[in-house]
Amino acid sequence: MRSLIPVAVVVAIIVSAWYAATVVMNAQWTRDQAARAGVEIGFSELVADTMDQKRPRLPAPHQVGAEIWNTTVEKKVTSKRSLVFHAWVTLSATLLGFAIGTGLGILLAFGIVHDRAMDMGVMPWAIASQTVPILAIAPMIIVVLFSIGISGLLPKAIISAYLSFFPVVVGMVAGFRSPDPLQLDLMKTYNASKAHIFWKLRVPASMPFLFASLKIGIAASLVGAIVGELPTGAVAGLGTRLLAGSYYGQTIQIWSALLTAAALAAALVGLIGLVQRTTLVRMGMHR
């Protein structure tokens, strides 16, 4: 219970600052409307109006909360106006891309650790790949794949994998190399093969690094899935909601999609954290 108090205090500060910013950013429109009507507006009326504009520069927290409620609880999950429906579309691409990126990252890390040529040749390219802005490369991936007849979920998953594999590569390389030289020497004195050293020593030692990398990777994967929805002309997904909101000036819709994406990312990271605690306890590791 005590651990919830700091969280509640931080949330209260954020919400208070958000309300204050709402008044500041939306006040000019209210003043302009009052000036056109030739009336004077008091401070209380100014504040009330900034909290209830249909297309505000910055929507108030209660407006975003009402939009999320209306598009989740009060809409069927199969409706294209439901945030649950759009979140599921994005989540599907996220999980597929995360699986591809994680598998590729672990394989590359294995090769880098066991082959000096891969270490010298692949690792620099893996680092260089992350310097290319995802907004620039995403349309290229979509166009190339569409030209060979691949569309739908897979292109978004590939973009998602592009962002998620790098944290896994870096983390697992560090994890596989984390055993102490004395531990490696001890295994060699037991005449252990490279396979035994890998499975009995390197893999268990890499588990904390793996889960730390997965937490970063799943968040990056979600970002990749959303970005992948922007240039595709998709009709579903959180990226589509963001794009439609920006086209029609629906800032409340934009913020509701943003907060939904943040909640989805937090849930995914929390799920990985739960698996991490369970796995490490069963392996006899204490955090």
Image (cartoon, rainbow, N blue to C red):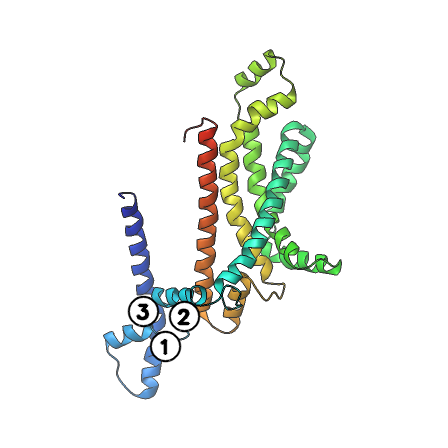
Real-space Cα separation, disc 1 to disc 2, in angstroms: 9 Å
Q: Secondary structure at mark 3?
A: helix
In terms of sequence position, does the residue under pointer 3 or pointer 1 come before the other?
Answer: 3
Does the image show residue 106?
yes
Q: Position of residue 268 (x, y in %)?
A: 48, 48
Q: Is residue 52 left or right of residue 171?
A: left
Q: Is residue 272 above or below residue 179?
A: below
- Residue at 61%, 48% in the rendered image: 161
Looking at the rendering, which quadrant does residue 195 occupy?
top right
Q: Amino acid at mark 3?
A: Val
Instruction: Assess whether mark 2 and mark 1 are in contact (beta carbons under 8 angstroms).
Output: yes
Real-space Cα separation, disc 3 to disc 2, in angstroms: 10 Å
Q: Position of residue 175 (x, y in %)?
A: 54, 31
Q: Is residue 140 above or below residue 180?
A: below
Identify the residue under disc 1.
29
Q: Position of residue 209 (x, y in %)?
A: 51, 34
Identify the residue under disc 2.
57
Decide which of 117, 149 is in the foreground and name it: 149
Identify the residue under disc 3.
23
